[in-house]
Amino acid sequence: MFRLTRRYRFAASHRLHAAALSEAENQRVYGKCNNPHGHGHNYVMDVSARGPVDEASGAAVDVRRLDRLVERAVLAPLGDSNLNTDVQAFRAAVPTSENLAVEICRRLKRNWNRAFPGEWPRLEKIRIAETERNIFEVGADEIE
Amino acid sequence: MFITRRAEFSASHVCRSPRLSEEENRQLFGKAANPSGHGHNYVLEVTLEGSPDAVTGMVFDLKELKEILSREVVEPYDHRFLNREVQPFDQVVPTTENIAREIWRRLESPLNCGGRKLHAVRLYETPDLFVDYFGESPCSA
């Protein structure tokens, strides 16, 4: 069994602010990330899929097909966006990188079977680095 | 406990399967199917699982591990055209997956001894594309 990991990059802005908390609580919880005008990151996203090698092609994952799926489902809609205002999911949820990893994983799961209709490869996990020091990982089986 | 040793080699390859049509090869591999080949700076990470020896405090002698990686992988692969010069890639497409599996086969017997075992082979074709191989068992997280 193989795990193939492909790295992608996109830039986006966000503001961390929870509607259920007061201004003072938001300031305390999110600090500088609560700045009303938002701020941005160069996100680095690793997408991992696993499966056996197809013996005819020698590949476990068709990387070009994965690239097209990720471009369509994630990079085009999220890249160079304001996550809070431009992405439906973050009208309700705070666009922390935890929630961003979950949203990306959902988008890939939703579109996976159209790109990869067979039993394999399967989406395994998403790893998002918000900065080089802050890294978030979610398994595809952890979310619906 | 896991220990990992890194090694590098540079090699050229062509991703083109005789079992696929010209169009299928182009569709699957894109520019990597160019018959004249192209190259990568491959980075290999080999992870062993074991317990530190009660006397030496080591899972595996890293000098010896370096020598094994050099003998089994770097010397035969470095600065070679894999499809033409390194078996079995005259028969098997040298995708990152197949190279990782072949490296596992080469390393399994010299490394699996005395309670230590090969846990994973990670091969980076580029910094943005890598494969983990865990042998024929299902892969873990």
Image (cartoon, coloured by chain):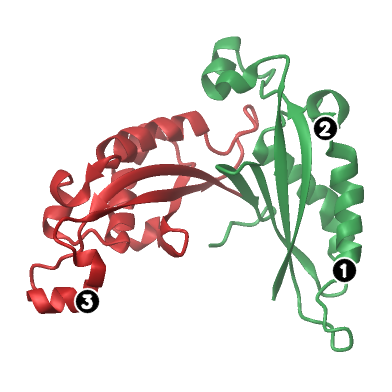
Q: Residue at x 32, y 41 (%)?
A: A74
Crowding at dot 2, Cα within 10 Å, few <14 / some 14-19 / many 20+, comes out as some
Residue visible at 14% across and 60% down?
A36
> Mark 3 near mark 1, Cβ–Cβ under 8 Å?
no
Give the labeled residue for mark 1. Answer: B113
Quarter residue B90 falls in = top right
Count of marks, rendered view: 3
The chain that hosts pointer 3 is A
Looking at the colours in the rendered structure, which chain would you say is drawn in green?
Answer: B
| Callout in the foreground (3, 2) | 3
Q: Amino acid at mark 3?
A: Val
Residue at disc 2, secondary structure:
loop
Chain letter, red: A
**On screen, A93 above or below B82?**
below
Residue A38 falls in image quadrant: bottom left
Q: Are marks 3 and 2 on the same chain?
A: no
Q: Residue at x 67, y 33 (%)?
A: B95
User: Which kind of residue does numbered mark 1 sit on?
Assistant: Cys
Which amino acid type is marked by label 2? Pro
Asked which secondary structure carries label 1, the reply is loop
Alpha-carbon span between mark 3 and mark 2: 57 Å
Picture quarter with the N terminus of chain B: bottom right
